[in-house]
Amino acid sequence: MHVRAILTTMCALGLGAVAMGAAPEHFQPRAKELLTDSIELIPSEHQLNVIYFVGNDREPVADHERRLSELLLYLQQYYGKEMARNGLGAHSFGLTMQENGNVLIHLVKGKKPHTEYAYGTGHNACLEEVNAYLDAVPGRRTSQHTFVIMPTHYDEQYNDLNPGGVPFYGLGTNCFALDYAHFDIQHIGKPTKEGRLLTKWYGGFAHELGHGLNLPHNKGTYSQNAALGTALMGAGNYTFGISPTYITLPSCRILEHSELFVPKGTTTKFYTQHHTPAIRTATFKRVGDALELYLESDSNVVNVNAYIQDPPFRVNQDYDAVPFTCRMSKTPTGGSAAYAIIPLSELVELKNIKGGTTALDILLQTHEGSRFRWRFPFNLSKVPADGNIEMGTPVIHRGY
């Protein structure tokens, strides 16, 4: 899959289109081919903890280090290219590398049989053991972000052609994905059973990693979807590798202040703000064919993302959220202000925008990456032209 470069030229990278060194000799030809299109990434201060976790009655799927290294390095490039395309520089999540060119993937053997680490319930026991492993040796934990990969169950229901049975979701700065024998980049984009399977599970791999990197769901605006394809944090887990799949600017703004994306030498301690940002002023109104959002907050807020979505307003029911973003700028009174214009033409894929209840979610992000969310519903059809939408008293929750 080729990442489209729209609006951003290579000059904007501050680096030029500098290719990486040759892929390791033991990588498969398809991986070498894909990685020749690499750009030079800005070195990261922190690295993703990559864990391969198996129950005490299981072994890793064959050749997992080579296969997963190829997949992770390609994904690292994808994130870096999307950050660059959005004008934020060639930053990506850091990976710890071994001398042979493989990604460092820690093999952790669980204390229990594999069935004790099942989808929906097994993540707690798994994370308890993973955290104990990472904290047992000083320096082994390289960030607050951990990616746990577990082999598919092999039983009457699951196998290499129908993987599953293990956790596959994001939980804060942790995320889970699976492995199986055909989880190999050589199948990417191919119209075969293995290729279609890879699109589903590698797309999900990329999507769940996004959650582990702090990203919420969002599908992109109408014009962005027309130009760029499918947003990764929307339905991109079904398109990655076979059709254009992109990361939205609001998502990239979040990554910009995520621990894994900051450049070498950054000393910021991430996710340490626990007090709720103060909202001093908030107005939301309809002006002609657009919505206008204006916020004033305390000075530590750097980005404001606005997401508009149809109901239901529940976890994993927000894939349709249409995102917008704006930077905070300083005010004369010592606070920060954000102003966003949301064209109604970008919301046409929302069923309720012309009548019915929709919700505006405002995500406030601080310099050290903490996120705070304020949600309120509104009915645009009941707002007169050039009229204000009553926002009420802010009820702000930590997280996203």
Image: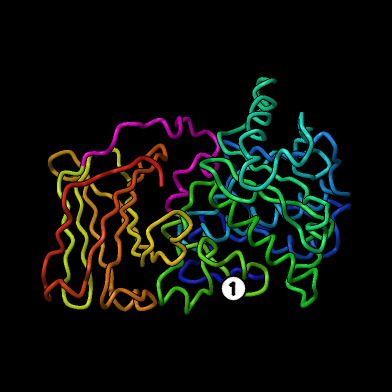
Q: Which residues are magenta?
A: 253-278
Give the vertical position of 234 relative to 121 (above or below).
below
Closer to the camera in the image, 68 or 208? 208
Judge by depth and name the residue closer to the eye, 141 or 80.
141
Residue closest to the eye, 195 or 366: 195
Q: Quadrant of residue 237?
A: bottom right
Q: Identify the main secondary structure in magenta.
A: loop
Mark 1 residue crowding within 10 angstroms, few (<14) / some (14–19) / many (20+): some
277, above or below 91, in the image? above
Instruction: Name the element at disc 1.
Output: loop
Give the mark count: 1
Q: Residue furthest front?
A: 156
Q: Which residue is mark 1?
A: 244
Direction from residue 10 to residue 191 in the image, left or right: right
- The kind of residue tagged 1 is Pro
Write the residue at 46% across / 48% down: 256
